Image (tube, rainbow, N blue to C red):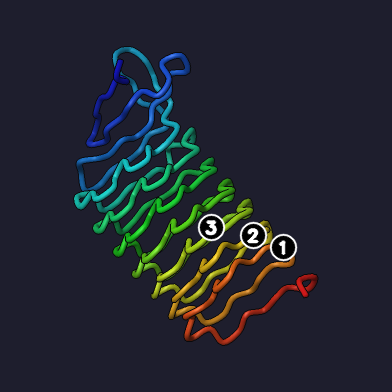
Amino acid sequence: AANLTFSYNGVNYEVVSSTNAEVCVTGGTKASLKIPKTISYGGTAYKVISIKSRAFKLNSVTKTIDMTQATELKEIQNYAFQNCDMLSSIELPKNLKYIGDLAFYYNTHLYNISIPDSVEYIGRMAFYNCTSLTSVSIGTSISSIGSQAFAECSSLSQFTIPESVGSIGDKAFYDCTSLTGITIPAGVSSIGSNVFTGCSRLASISAASGNG
């Protein structure tokens, strides 16, 4: 049987576990959306635990999403916001763990993003070609930055790689033509190929002591 689906305040939901009373977000139909911690339907209060794969893919309606109340939300799955060409502002929740592959791929109107301290993983091409992105603040739990995660982010001028990062994937910052300086923390043990290729303004890459 198909999972139960319902909508409230312009947000579409799908029940992923009736036993645990959990739902995922499968999309939205309004310009401004708020994702709650729990949503009640049919007498049950469901916890909102993830943004489903492809939930907002090719959505050209939604401009702002506030997830700050969604403290049960742990995952933004692969392709969740792929090609959301009108999305300019998204606030992520504090207990988020995982940002999937191509999650914000080609979000050309997204200007900044603050990745909470809880996030451990940023997938490949997660922010690929977010050409308006000028600033990214990254939390202190990230262990891995996926390949091409920030490639083609041509407006990104500053980026601080947190101390928690152990691996940086291939072409992670490829063609970030506005990037002027970056520090690689001491804990990074694996750096892919062509990570900074095409970063034409990058004057300095400093490796923290202990990095050789």
**Which corner quadrant of the image does residue 167 belong to?**
bottom right
Residue 66 appears at what percent x and percent y?
Answer: 36, 46
- Where disc 2 sits, the SS reads strand
At a point 57% along the width and 62% down the height, the residue shown is 169
Residue 29 appears at what percent x and percent y?
Answer: 20, 41
Q: Residue furthest right?
A: 210
Dot 1, how many residues are within 10 Å of its Cα: few (below 14), some (14-19), or many (20+)? few
Q: Earlier in the sequence, mark 3 or mark 1?
A: 3
Where is mark 2, residue-wise?
Answer: 167
Residue 134 appears at what percent x and percent y?
Answer: 41, 70
Q: Earlier in the sequence, mark 3 or mark 2?
A: 3
How far apart are the alpha carbons under marks 3 and 2?
8 Å
Which mark, residue 136?
Answer: none
Q: Earlier in the sequence, mark 2 or mark 1?
A: 2
At a point 55% along the width and 71% down the height, the residue shown is 195
Where is mark 3, residue-wise?
Answer: 146
Are the two marked residues, 2 and 1, in contact with CB atoms closer than 8 angstroms? yes
What is the three-letter code of the residue carrying label 2? Ser
Residue 30 appears at what percent x and percent y?
Answer: 20, 43
How far apart are the alpha carbons under marks 3 and 1?
14 Å
What is the three-letter code of the residue carrying label 3? Gly
Where is mark 1, residue-wise?
Answer: 189
- Where disc 3 sits, the SS reads loop
Dot 2, how many residues are within 10 Å of its Cα: few (below 14), some (14-19), or many (20+)? some
What is the three-letter code of the residue carrying label 1? Ser
Which corner quadrant holds the N terminus?
A: top left
**Which corner quadrant of the image does residue 104 belong to?**
bottom left
At a point 44% along the width and 73% down the height, the residue shown is 156
